Image (cartoon, rainbow, N blue to C red):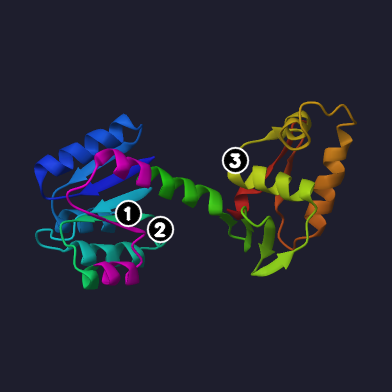
Amino acid sequence: MHIVVVEDDKHINEVVSEYMKEAGYTVTTIFDGKTANDMLEKDIKADLFILDIMLPHVTGLALLKSIREHEHHTETPVIMLTAVVDEYTQLLSFEELADDYVTKPFSPKVLVKRVQALLRRKSNTSSTIKTGIHIDIDSYIAYESGTPVKLTLREFELLKLLIQNPGLVFTRQQLLDAVWGYDYFGDERVVDVHIKNLRKKFCGQVVATVKGVGYRLNVESV
C-alpha cells in the first residue's frame, strides 16, 4: 500500500518514512503543502496520508480539505501529525474529516500501529461496486441502492469473497473451499445453485460466469 507523508521537518519526515517502509509500505515523502496539493491535482494514488499542519505554502488543514474534495480520496484515511495540541485545531481537523490526530512528540512504532488499524478498517468495513451494491462486513448485511437485501450466510460469504477479489476468477472448488470449507465433500453444483439465487436477489448483474472456469465479480460494473 502507498502512504504519502507530508512533513516539512526533514528529520521527522525521514523517521516516519523509514518506519513505514520497514512495515512494508511504499512511501512518498513531501516537504511542503503546495507540492502535495500539486501532486493531488495530478491524481496521485494513495492509500493513506500523514499530514503535518504547519506546512509551508499550503497548510495541512487546507490540504486535508483538498483531499476530501478529491473524487478518489473522499474516504482515504488521513492522519494529522502535528505539534499543534490545542482543542480547537483538533476539533477542526475532525470536522474536516481527519481520521486520526497524533501530537508531537510521538512514538513511530505506535504511529505504524495507527496506520495499520486505519488501513485494516478501511479494507474490512465496506466494499462497493458501482451498481449500488455494497456490503457491511461487520453486520453481515448487503445493500442495493441503500436498501437491505436479505441473503443467506452462504450467499453473503460468496458475495464478500468476490467483492474483495475483483478481477479474480474462482473455480467451483475454490469457492467451495473458501465458503463451505475444505472438509465439504458434496456436489460442486451447489455453488451454481447459490450463485443463481444470489443473482436473483439483485437488480444489477453482480456475478459473471467465465465459461469453462468459474465465477468472478462482474468487473464491468466496477
- Looking at marks 2 and 1 on the same chain, the residue that comes earlier in the sequence is marked by 1
- Percent position of residue 124, x then y: 54, 49
Quadrant containing the N terminus is: top left
- Closer to the chain start, of discs 2 and 3, is 2
The residue singled out by tag 2 in the image is: 72
Instruction: Check if residue 103 falls in the magenta segment.
Output: yes
Q: Earlier in the sequence, mark 3 or mark 1?
A: 1
Q: Nearer the viewer, mark 2 or mark 1?
A: 2
The residue to which callout 3 is attached is 167
Residue 142 at x, y = what percent? 69, 59
Q: Label 3 amino acid?
A: Gly
Side of 56 where 62 appears, left or right? right
Contact between marks 2 and 1 (CB within 8 A): the answer is yes
Which type of secondary structure does the marked residue at label 3 adopt? Answer: loop
Residue 185, quarter of picture: top right
Identify the amino acid type marked 1: Asp
Query: How many discs mark residues in the rendered view?
Result: 3
Q: Residues within 10 Å of mark 3 (few under 14, many from 20)?
A: some
Whole-number angstrom distance, CA of label 3 to CA of label 1: 23 Å
Front residue of 89/30: it is 89
**Separation (CA) of disc 2 from disc 3:** 20 Å
The magenta stretch is 90-114
Please tell me whether residue 165 belongs to the stretch shown in magenta.
no
Residue occupied by mark 1? 43
